[in-house]
Image (cartoon, grey):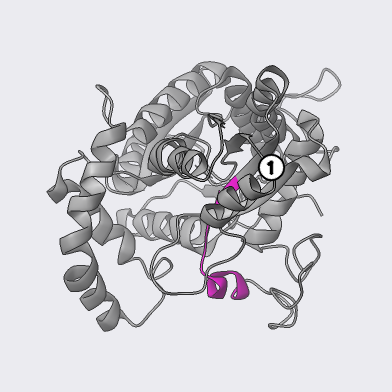
Amino acid sequence: MSQFTSDQATNDQPTKDQPKNSASKKKRGVLLLNLGTPDSAEPEDVGRYLKEFLMDKYVLDIPWLFRWFLVNVAIVPKRKFASSKLYKSIWTKRGSPLLCHLEDLASKVEEELGSGYVIAKAMRYQKPSVESALVQLEKADLDEILVFPLYPQYAESATRSSVEFTEKIAQRLGMKTPIRFVPAFYDHPLFIEAASIPVRKVWEEKKPDHLIMSFHGLPERHVQKTDRSGGNHCLKSADCCLQIGEANRDCYRAQSFATARLIAMKAGIPPGKYTVSFQSRLGRAIWIQPDTEEVIPALVKKGVKSLAVVCPSFVADCLETLEEIDVRGKELFKHSGGDDFYAIPCVNSDPTWVKAVATIVRETNARAAKLTPELTSAQG
């Protein structure tokens, strides 16, 4: 069931029949939070970022001592040089594309929401830090703060990690301002509308044979941890993710399929003309399927000569979209015998997405005002 229903308020302003109350006069903060990026594309900065990211217990969910050895001895010392080369290939004059898009989004959302809001931005890993953003918001003398994790689908390695980390920093800072969190928005109509616009444009103008919706991958065990049936539903059948119910309402894979279905419907993509897949595998663990690197050559073998790829688990173009898909994905497609390859951009700071973010902020605040003034969780 959708977390966003049609009877939810779309703004936090009183109607003409409602008297103004304290809620309408509140000064609110919004923290736009994305995952992270190195300070530069140099190996040492990339290594520092990788260490912080991989040492997260929700990312690499193994015992601490083994995790520390694996990250600091086996992975990062070598991987930082290879990853540095990849980051350098997509780095811009402004710096990290992910950070640039976050800065642009924050600026435009601030303008869209108006003077009643103070906007801050942060990365779960590295800079700008969550701590610096919370300090900024606390100094603004706000009535409440809404943290907006920019991950459409719920995952413990992204959403839960970001929520718990933010709460931990807020507690350490001794913050008094109430903090709430925007839940996963994988099926929000305005996110779907924003994400479908570039898909529809490429589909109608370029007329590719097929579309891949490539989501970031996760180890299967991460998905199984969110199974509310006690392990009786997730990955137990081939069609376990085709519908969302109580057992799998927090399932990243199921939410990804739901996002794909909604985007396809909105963009006018027939069911047989798109494929859902998952990218960015790391290590030897079993990851959720199908794998994008296997889907691309398989489609070529079926006769696909023109392919478009979009990545709806990302709201901003980054290493995974710009290098992994638009460079390596394109090379794989053409090496396999394909001709035309179209990497579809993320929503970034597109006007439709800016309005969507502002509306989701207003919806969440309005809903929270109706329910309770207390601190709420990321799951809503």
Amino acid at dot 1: Gly
State the residue in front, 137 or 252. Answer: 252
Q: Residues within 10 Å of mark 1 (few under 14, many from 20)?
A: few
* Range covered by the magenta-colored residues: 214-225
Q: Quadrant of the C terminus?
A: bottom right
Asked whether residue 374 appears in the rendered view, the answer is no
Q: Quadrant of the N terminus?
A: bottom right
Residue 166 lies, in percent from the top left, at 41, 54
State the residue in front, 328 or 58. Answer: 328
Asked whether residue 70 appears in the rendered view, the answer is yes
State the residue in front, 304 or 74. Answer: 304
**Residue tagged by mark 1?**
303
Mark 1 falls on what kind of element?
Answer: loop
Residue at 32% from the left image edge and 58% from the top image edge: 53
Residue 158 lies, in percent from the top left, at 48, 56
The answer to whether 62 appears left or right of 351 in the picture is: left
Would you identify the image quadrant in which residue 223 lies? Answer: bottom right
Residue 200 lies, in percent from the top left, at 71, 25
Residue at 76% from the left image edge and 70% from the top image edge: 238
Q: Does residue 125 belong to the magenta stretch?
A: no
State the residue in front, 376 or 261. Answer: 261
Residue 245 lies, in percent from the top left, at 81, 64
Residue at 51% from the left image edge and 69% from the top image edge: 219
Residue at 47% from the left image edge and 62% from the top image edge: 157
Q: In the picture shown, does residue 145 fall above or below 255? A: above
Q: Does residue 215 belong to the magenta stretch?
A: yes
